[in-house]
Amino acid sequence: MGETTEQQEQQEQQDQQPGRPTAGPVTLTTERLVLRAPQESDIEAVHRACQDEEIQRWTVVPVPYRREDAAFFVHDLAANGWRTGDALVWCVFERGSGALVGSQGLTRNPGRTGTAEVGWWATKEHRGRGYTVEAARAVARYGLTELGLRRLEWVAYVGNGPSRAVAEKVGFRMEGTLRSYAEQRGRFHDAWIGGLLATDLAGTTGTAGVDGPDRRTGPVG
């Protein structure tokens, strides 16, 4: 009985740590975009998007990318991430057309309270419109204000200039190069790292709305 109580207290303390949403998936909105948790209806669009060679080059998506991988992304990776609060994943949609324009992620760093790593990809046909910057700002503000995180980190393979440009526009400060740091399909790559604090957001533009727990869809999977 005592052990169960102790485990419950430990779980409660863990749930109250910065960086954990309190009630399931959260939908974010910006002027042009809607960010929500992935769901069944997104599988085909995610599968199509991840055929892009640039996404495969700069991320850890499986290659070749099969429909089963998109289903795993929706039903397992994203759903479990929201359930535990350890890895929050959004699909990003254009408000007017409802088209999938990318994905955003916010992953807590184990053992480093109050910190999380961000990540994103953009669909080929919607690049160059500022959507990734707009979505990333929304996620950053949510993490640093709503979730109370003290620091966000951006990490990308050296050479990924477009991702670095997005990070810098959001307000991340480049902090150096980590040698042989980031693994991709069995190989380790040098990586750039940037950091963002709540005070760094003051100079950025754009606002985001938080619609609250997405009770329309609930946990996916």
Image: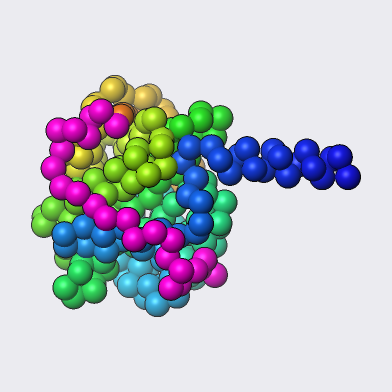
Q: Residue 63 at what x, y percent from top left? A: 41, 58
Looking at the image, which is closer to me, 182 or 151?
151
What color scheme is it? rainbow
The range drawn in magenta is 198-221
Indicate whether residue 113 is drawn in magenta. Answer: no
The residue located at (32%, 56%) in the rendering is 210
Look at the picture and state if 133 lies above or below 125: above
The one nearer the camera, 118 or 139, is 139
Q: Is residue 101 visible?
A: no
- 205 falls in the magenta region: yes
Give how far across and how far down residue 139 sits, in percent. 31, 48
Q: Residue at x 25, y 28 (%)?
A: 199
**Residue at image location 49% in from the left, 45% down from the top:** 20
Q: Quadrant of residue 183?
A: top left
As drawn, 185 above or below 175: below
Q: Quadrant of the N terminus?
A: top right
Q: Quadrant of residue 126?
A: bottom left
The residue located at (16%, 62%) in the rendering is: 32
Residue 33 position in % (x across, y down): 22, 62
Vertical relation: 168 (above or below) 100: above
Please state, as top left, top right, bottom left or bottom right, where the C terminus lies in the image: bottom right
Which of the pair 191/195 is nearer the observer? Answer: 195
Q: Position of residue 44 (x, y in %)?
A: 37, 75
Give the mark count. Answer: 0
Vertical placement of residue 145 versus 131, above or below: above
* Outermost residue to the left: 129
- State the residue lying farthest toward the right: 1
Q: Is residue 193 visible?
A: yes
